[in-house]
Image (tube, helix red, strand yellow):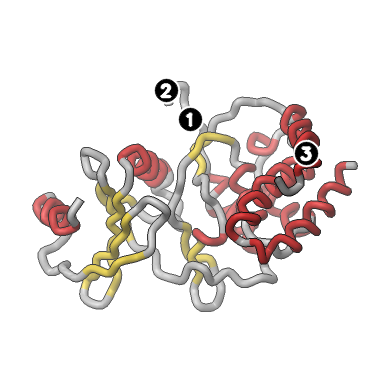
Amino acid sequence: MDIQLILNELYEAGVLESHMQNLKPLTGGTSSEVVVVMDGTRPRYVIKQNDPAIVKAEAEFLYTYAQIEKLSRLVYVDPLHRYLVYTFKPGFTGQYCEGNKGELLLSLVTEVIAHYKTLGEERDYLYSDHRFVHTLVARTAQRNLKYLLHGDFGVHNFVFAENGTLTGIIDPDPVVGEPLYDLIYAFCSSPDELIVETILPAFEKLGPEMTGEYVLNREVLQGLYFRIATCIRHHPEDLDQYTKAWNYWLNRVQ
């Protein structure tokens, strides 16, 4: 959809003020088109176009968790779900610094994951380990708890201030599942500090209703297995670190 047509709709709806004319393109996801609306020299809003089903899901996520400060505030959703508008989160993406992953995970748990809500009724590498992972999945307790999750809770979607402080989380790809999924996703999303001492304090901060009878070692192994598949395709330079982490966690369950 032409961005000028979107701007005209937003002016008419009173979402944007008439002086907000300047736009700054951003790099979106694989299928989204993203621009920032400037208020003078200050980034104010983000306009994001995507497939209607994706727009609808992202809007629902932001609406559901409007009280979470680290997330952008939903401002407007196109009635046809062609685009949505949310507040701009200042800071830098891609600025994750190794060395404080445990502190980051604690912040994610206490400020985001702990506030997740349940949904109502309405709503070829390591191939030899494939059978082992299949067994882990089969043995996982099935509790059928349904929470609305961020779904793409990796360091690439975390916004940091210049001093390294987490200031925001962007680009949800919402899924329904259990909160531990997002915590392990964040833990495995970078190859550093993939040891139990890093994740355990954050894991223990989650209430029993969010962790239940899960065995952390097995859950992390599943997360690592899928992360390694992504690593091989997109970040092969990290493979050695992930391989060491795999062997470390494998030894913890054997």
Crowding at dot 2, Cα within 10 Å, few <14 / some 14-19 / many 20+, comes out as few
Name the residue rendered at 29%, 65% in the picture: 36
Q: Are marks 3 and 2 in contact (CB under 8 Å)?
A: no
| In-front residue for pair 65/254 | 254
Cα distance between the residues tagged 3 and 2: 30 Å
Mark sitting on residue 215: 3
Q: Amino acid at mark 1?
A: Leu
Q: Is residue 157 above or below residue 55?
A: below
Q: Which residue in the protein does label 1 denote?
A: 119
Q: Quadrant of residue 154?
A: bottom right
Q: Residue at x 31, y 54 (%)?
A: 48
Numbered disc 2: secondary structure: loop
Q: Residue at x 13, y 51 (%)?
A: 9
- The answer to whether 212 is drawn above or below residue 235 in the figure is above
Q: Earlier in the sequence, mark 3 or mark 1?
A: 1
On the image, the x and y values in percent for residue 200 come to 75, 52
> At which x and y percent is residue 245?
78, 56
Q: Residue furthest front?
A: 124
**Residue most extreme to the right:** 254
Q: Nearer the viewer, mark 3 or mark 1?
A: 3
SS of the residue under disc 1: loop
Residue 206 screen position, x and y as percent: 66, 45
> Is any part of residue 14 visible from this angle?
no
